[in-house]
Image: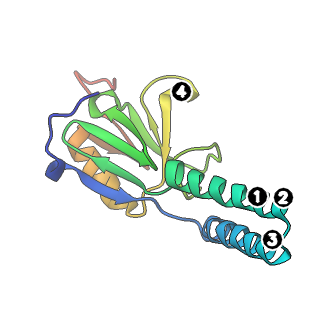
Amino acid sequence: VTDSSSPADVRWFRSAVDWWLAAILVALPFTQVWALLSALRSGESESVLATAFGCALVAAIYGLLVFPMRYGISSEQLVIRFGVVRQRIRLTDIREVYPTHNPLSSPALSLNRLAIRTGTGMTGIALVSPSSRGEFLETLASRAGLVSEGDRLVRAPVGGRSV
């Protein structure tokens, strides 16, 4: 999906972060660095190599798949960015947005999520967790032509029926 919008047109939202996940995200690299320093003090080259590999693996995962984690809404698409990956969803493809606590792996650092349904089945759903949830929903609704229906957003009715 290409977007003719200018970068200034994109409204960005950070991911919310659950406290327990933040603790894990902070503890993991500290644990790896502590293990590396312990291995360096022991002088065992196999231990140093193994813990250095562990540190590099954690850094690679964080840099390639976790940070930054944010969501951008332009006039034409929703951009879900996690690390170096960008998932783009045309706003016209969004059928419904609803709250969920689905724990499936997704570019969301909180279980207080929004499911963005574009099709059928699990491949037709993206899970996000914007920290400014109300602003995110308001921006998405206005730019995608969605209407509020209780706690969800749906495609505006055309000719009296929802699409």
Discs 1, 2 touching: Cβ within 8 Å:
yes
Instruction: Characterize the local packing of mark 3: few (<14), some (14-19) or many (20 or more) Cα atoms within 10 angstroms.
Output: some
Q: Could you give the CA–CA distance between mark 3 and mark 4, rounded to whole angstroms?
A: 44 Å
If the image is split into quadrants, where does the C terminus sit?
A: top left
Verify CB contact (< 8 Å) between mark 3 and mark 4. Answer: no
Looking at the image, is mark 3 or mark 4 nearer the viewer?
3
Residue 46, labelled with which disc? 2
Callout 2 amino acid: Glu
Amino acid at pointer 1: Leu
Q: Which mark is residue 49?
A: 1
Tag 3 or tag 2, which sits nearer the N-term?
A: 3
Q: Is residue 151 left or right of residue 113?
A: left
Give residue 39's mark: 3
**Residue 127: horizontal and vertical position, in percent?**
50, 43
Residue sitting at 57 percent across and 29 percent down?
Answer: 122
30 relative to 5, above or below: below
Mark nearest the camera among 4 and 2 is: 2
The secondary structure type at the circle numbered 3 is helix
Q: Under tag 2, what secondary structure?
A: helix
Amino acid type assigned to the residue bearing label 4 in the image: Thr
